[in-house]
Amino acid sequence: MREINDISDRFSTVADVAAAGLCCFCGACRGVCPRQAVTIRFDGSFPRPVVDTEACNQCGLCVAVCPGHGVDFDSLNKDFFGQVPQDKILGYSRGFYVGAVNNSAERFRRTSGGLAKELAIWGLENNQWQGVVVSRVCSGDFHRVETFIATTSQEVRSSSSSLYCPVPACSVWQTLRDFPGQVCFIGIPCHIHALRKAQQHLEWLRKKIIFTIGLFCSGTPGFDATEAFLSYHNIDPVQVLSLQYRSGGWPGDICVHIRGESEPYRFARGRAARLLDHLRFAAAFQRRGAFVNRRCLTCPDHVAELADLSLGDAWHIGYDREKQGLNIIVVRSRQAQQITDRMCRENRIFMHEISQQRMVESQQACLATKKKRSPIFALLGRKNLLSPQFTGQPILPTNRWDHWAARLEWMQIWLSEDRRRWWLLLFLAPLMAVLRRLAGKDLGDHNT
């Protein structure tokens, strides 16, 4: 049952994958285990899989579906899209668009155009699927996230619009066998990688999850990122009743509800008036920032290349003054094309086609960071640490700024591991921002 390649043979269970520092925290191992021998433990900055050795029968399924040790993009593209994509930067696609929901209030509330929730709700209303896998921060405890199957539009709306923390969303698959219907799955790239690998092994999962919405991701911060952000603002985490990572228009504010306070504290995400506030946000949540797990540094997929439909923010292509929010959209499957066309005809959403080049320009810095992985692989090699294996992904040429950025990214992670050093990240954040801008300037010929 287990996939055979050089690295997966080293692991008996996902506990070994986690011990090697390759866990993505996607929860797929718990979601597919036939003996329910895997649990997800929340006891640090990142949740981790724990294997009950007495219940485990070493079937190898958890390792087979785990994206942490590697992903064969060529095989998965052939299986789910019928071909290996010529575009190795953006993956297989049928078209690129900018769009949003037509309901202005919902668009403002959801920050980034609101298409993910609108697609999910439309599918429920039109019986395209009977459930939607969504996640949200647990009320009263931002160190925990719950993933559930929403069956109504109200439940979909209750999920979080954005989560800057680890979400083991795939763990909910364990409940799908008994769910009376088919579902839509919303997740970040590593969730989609795990799902596609699992669907190659489990026919029932392929039949249950019939549509996937992938959310662009540059790296997932651990729960310590939120705690550091609160500490920079002298907020006691124990007093936090609830927290929203993005609310109130685009690009969205961090909204913190404090016990005993009638109004929430709002912290501007992208338009803070004071330099110190910019540094506080950057130190905690900057792209590929200090609090991401090192496995995120090796991931080649920013735009959820294996999802039916991929969504992100429309940065840097003339929409930066937009305050209600716009999605940039990659339509990949025939089903996604049919659904979005119908929603446009019904005036639920609007979409304007853009060129492939405009799509690249919108995400250029993030794409360059993801595809220029040789400096971090070299760094891991020098430290005798394992790197995941990716088939069908380019490794673009690098410059000296890429190598400096990789070294400082590693230093940031080291600094973030001790709370006494968190204040140093405030000084490192602007330097990292400059280095990433220099390193991400050129993607070259992105089809090679």
Image (cartoon, rainbow, N blue to C red):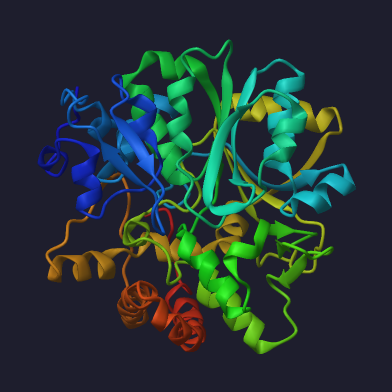
**Residue at image coords 70%, 38%:** 117
Q: Nearer the viewer, residue 267 or 217?
A: 267
Is residue 285 in view? yes
Q: Residue furthest front?
A: 260
Quadrant where the C terminus is found in the figure: bottom left
Query: In x, y percent, where is residue 272?
Result: 72, 79
Q: Of 9 and 371, which appears nearest the observer?
A: 9
Image height check: is 279 above or below 270? below
Is residue 207 toward the left or the right of residue 39 in the image? right
> Which residue: 39% across, 38% down?
27
Residue 65 against residue 97 in the figure, above or below: above
Q: Quadrant of the N terminus?
A: top left
> Relative to the observer, which residue lies in front, 43 or 379?
43
The residue under the point 43% across, 19% down is: 205
Query: Could you say where residue 250 lies in the image, as x and y percent from the top left?
Result: 75, 61
Q: Answer whether residue 244 is visible to the viewer in this image.
A: no
Tell me residue 26's x, y (percent): 41, 42
Work out whether 385 lies above or below 198: below
- Residue 388 vs 193, above or below: the answer is below
Q: Is residue 307 left or right of residue 95?
A: left
Say how many tags the image has. 0
**Residue at left offset 48%, top offset 38%:** 169
**Which picture quadrant has residue 419?**
bottom left
Quarter assignment of residue 226: bottom right
Please name whichever residue, 80 or 39, is drawn nearer the observer in this view of the structure. Answer: 39
The quarter of the displayed image where residue 405 is located: bottom left
Does residue 91 appear to the left or right of 258 in the view shown?
Answer: left
User: Residue 209 placed where, x, y %?
Assistant: 51, 22
